[in-house]
Image (cartoon, rainbow, N blue to C red):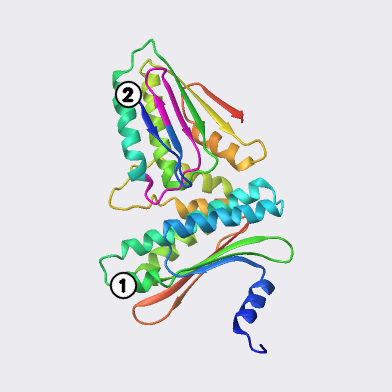
């Protein structure tokens, strides 16, 4: 399976999904003109990756999202739900969400996203 | 230079505490530039990070909402007129309260729905807004609508006082809609 690497921009995060080391990282602000268009190939990649994932593999998801607009939030939620379903299905997946200690809103955002998920979550200052 | 109109405008903006104002067609590039500029400005003034984040967040939702509304009018023949009617202002009053104030033309046929949505948000406290936000966050995406319907809920959540809005009828086709949020 190929790596998914997308360079970041002012309004789109850097994507670095590495299927060899099972690390999925999203880093940066997200408020593109059309979030669904930006995230569609990313969600498709994740579908494909999870389908091929072996039960023994340990997957680490790393998020650093200093700002996400609402339509990006919707896409990030979809991504997390896919991973959570895979976790409930027996895959080993955990999520670490890095936030800015001086920004309550960023922490609040991380907590809201993760409070209904089942997979192990670490919310850490960056 | 007694009647220097630009200087007068400049004074007026300063008196009103306006940090940034833009009037015209919103593009993604303009939204990004203005958003980053206001962030830098507030950082230089050492406002709390949470406040800066909330101003930025409201600004992005407000301007992207308007832009999406304009785009939805692409096939109506009113696109240019509506797109060019947009305005957004970010300022602060004497006590340091920041506000994000936007306006745009809307078709009269859309005003009832708009008014209904905002009035519904008015009755909700922060906890109820959070619940509504999460519920909408998990709703299936309707590919026909670019907007997740979340923008206004998010603006209401981030605003420290209830959203102020007005809808003023201009003629038989259009009204002017304004929305103000504060941080």
Residue A94 appears in the picture as rendered? yes
Badge 1: few (under 14), some or many (20 or more) residues near its Cα, within 10 Å?
some
Badge 2: few (under 14), some or many (20 or more) residues near its Cα, within 10 Å?
some
Residue B51 lies, in percent from the top left, at 64, 50
Residue at the right extreme, as displayed: B95
Is B67 above or below relative to B134?
Answer: below
Instruction: Name the chain under label 2.
Output: A
Label 2 SS: helix
Q: Is residue A18 magenta?
A: yes
Residue B79 located left or right of residue B122: left
Q: Provide the residue span drawn in magenta.
A: A16-35
Q: Are tags 1 and 2 found on a single chain?
A: no
Residue at the top extreme, as displayed: A56
Residue in view at x 44 percent, y 74 percent: B176
Is B26 above or below relative to A81?
Answer: below
Residue in view at x 42 percent, y 29 percent: A16
Residue B78 circle label: 1
Residue A49 circle label: 2
CB atoms of marks 1 and 2 within 8 Å: no
What is the quadrant of the C terminus of chain A in the image? top right
Residue at the left extreme, as displayed: B75
Residue B49 located left or right of residue B106: right
Residue B158 circle label: none
Residue B53 located left or right of residue B73: right
Residue A82 lies, in percent from the top left, at 36, 29
Q: Is residue B171 magenta?
A: no
């Amino acid at each position: 399976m190929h790596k998914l690497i997308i360079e970041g921009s002012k309004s789109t995060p850097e994507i670095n999904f590495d299927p060899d080391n099972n690390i999925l990282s999203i880093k940066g602000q997200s408020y593109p003109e059309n979030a669904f268009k930006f995230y569609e190939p990313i969600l498709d990649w994740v579908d494909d990756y999870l389908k091929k994932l072996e039960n023994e593999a340990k997957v680490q998801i790393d998020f650093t999202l200093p700002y996400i607009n609402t339509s990006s939030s919707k896409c990030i939620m979809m991504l997390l739900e896919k991973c959570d379903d895979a976790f409930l299905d027996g895959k080993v997946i955990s999520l670490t969400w890095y936030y800015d200690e001086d920004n309550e809103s960023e922490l609040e955002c991380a907590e809201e996203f993760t409070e209904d998920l089942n997979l192990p979550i670490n919310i850490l200052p960056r | 230079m007694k009647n220097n109109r630009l200087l007068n405008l400049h004074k007026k903006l300063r008196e009103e505490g306006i940090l940034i104002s833009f009037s015209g067609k919103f593009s993604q590039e303009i939204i990004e530039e203005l958003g980053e500029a206001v962030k830098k400005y507030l950082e230089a003034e050492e406002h709390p990070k949470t406040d800066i984040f909330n101003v930025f967040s409201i600004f992005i939702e407000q301007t992207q909402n308007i832009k999406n509304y304009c785009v939805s009018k692409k096939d109506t023949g009113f696109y240019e007129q509506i797109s060019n009617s947009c305005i957004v202002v970010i300022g602060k009053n004497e006590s340091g309260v920041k506000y994000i104030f936007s306006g745009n033309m809307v078709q009269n046929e859309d005003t009832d729905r708009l008014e209904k949505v905002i009035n519904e948000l008015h009755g909700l406290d922060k906890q109820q807004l959070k619940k509504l936000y999460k519920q909408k966050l998990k709703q299936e995406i309707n590919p026909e609508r670019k907007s997740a319907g979340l923008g206004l809920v998010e603006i209401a959540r981030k605003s420290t006082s209830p959203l102020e809005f007005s809808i003023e009828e201009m003629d038989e086709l259009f009204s002017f809609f304004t929305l103000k949020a504060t941080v």
